[in-house]
Structure formats: structure tokens, C-alpha cells
Image (cartoon, rainbow, N blue to C red):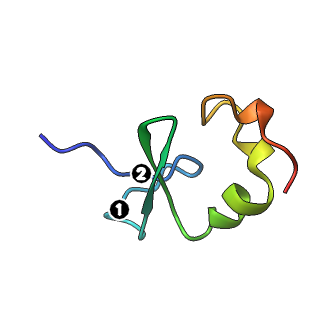
Amino acid sequence: MSQIKACIVCKKTSEETPVTKFIYKASKFYICPQHMPVLIHNPQELVGLLPDADKFENG
């Protein structure tokens, strides 16, 4: 039983595209290279995808 590793934004799996794991609030999440800039520069776009993303400041 392995956990599906998929981008939190586009839902593409590690079988379709490379994904990078990151830890936030003691949970594991995955993001693909295409959406890494969202995490870095526009994290407010992750509201509903990450806990407390509504509290992120604009990048």
C-alpha cells in the first residue's frame, strides 16, 4: 500500500510528472515543477488545498 504522490494543484501523479515532497504542519504534500512558483510566489492561491493557506502573506 503506497500513498499516491500527486501535485496538490493539478493532481498529476508521480507517474505523469516529477513531484517534490514538502512538509507543512507535520503533513506531507507534493507539488510538481509547474506549480512550484505558486507555492513560492502566490501561496494564497493554495487556499482550500493546504491548511491555513488563507493566512499566508503575498509573496
Per the image, the residue denoted by label 1 is 14
Residue 20 x %, y %:
44, 63
Q: Nearer the viewer, residue 59 or 48?
A: 59
Kindly state the secondary structure of the residue where label 1 is placed.
loop
Q: Quadrant location of residue 33?
A: bottom right
Quarter placement of the N terminus:
top left
Q: Residue at x 41, y 51 (%)?
A: 6
| Amino acid type indicated by mark 1 | Ser
Q: Residue furthest left?
A: 1
Type of the residue with mark 2: Ala
Answer whether labels 1 and 2 touch (C-beta < 8 Å). yes
Tag 2: Cα neighbours inside 10 Å, few (<14), some, or many (≥20)? many
Spatial separation of the CA atoms under disc 1 and disc 2: 6 Å
Q: Mark 1 vs mark 2: which is more N-terminal?
A: 2
Residue 27: percent from the left, percent from the top? 42, 37
Question: Where residue 15 sits in the image (x, y, percent)?
Answer: 31, 64
Q: Which mark is residue 6?
A: 2
